[in-house]
Image: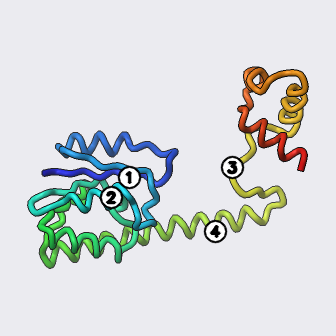
Amino acid sequence: MKYGYARVSTVQQDLKAQLQTLEKEGCEKIYSEKFTGTKTDRPEFKKLLSMLKDGDTLVITKLDRFARSTGDAIKTIKTLFEKGVKVHVLNMGIIENTSTGRLIFNIMSSFAEFERDMIVERTQEGKAIAKQRGDFREGRPKKYSKKQIEHALGLLDNRSYKEVENMTGISKSTLIREKRNSYN
């Protein structure tokens, strides 16, 4: 049987492109999840690995969807080869259980891990530079100004949360959090 695996790192990312690619590739069963690749405890991936048996094929779109750590990738591929499972990484080809196939896989896994490490390093460097600015704030910028929040909280004196939400566009949960923070 041909199984597919699709993964994105955050809940905001979309799996659609990977799922469509795996369907076009003829995968009969596709497992997918929104879970960081830096963790080895990916529930859907674990479930998929337990399902695979001799003669099955595991299809993934790119190597970094499979594993980010070279050690983890090598361990997983070795386990799959021992079960008699073929692995097809669409942007690389079929990984063969031969000396050359394992060498190429190991090299490509190392590159995937290197790429991930470089992204983390560049992100940290950018953050360090940004922190030198006086106006640096960690996290996402505030959606509403202090003045907008104060106005919305003032409206709550004689209106319901729903009415204020409809008038201002500021969600009830944001209003409740801001109201609680203004009393602390």
Which callout, 1 or 2, points at the residue further toward the start of the chain?
1
Q: Residue at x 45, y 55 (%)?
A: 35
Which of the two discs, 4 and 3, labels the residue nearer the N terminus?
4
Could you say which quadrant of the image residue 175 lies in?
top right
Instruction: Name the kind of residue labelled 2 in the image.
Output: Phe
Q: Which amino acid, by three-letter code, is at mark 4?
A: Glu
Q: Which of the numbered marks, if any, corresponds to residue 140?
A: 3
Is 83 on the left or on the right of 71, as rendered? left
Residue neighbourhood size for the residue with mark 2, other residues' Cα within 10 Å, grouped as few (<14), some (14–19), many (≥20): some
Side (left or right) of 66 relative to 56: right
1 and 2 marks in contact (CB < 8 Å): yes
Spatial separation of the CA atoms under disc 1 and disc 4 = 27 Å
Residue at label 4?
125
User: How far separated are the C-alphas under marks 2 and 3?
Assistant: 30 Å
Choose mark 4 or mark 3, whichever is in front: 3
The x and y percentages for residue 90 are 24, 54
Report helix, strand or loop for mark 1: strand
Q: Mark 2 = which residue?
A: 45
Secondary structure, mark 3, is: loop
Q: Amino acid at mark 3?
A: Arg
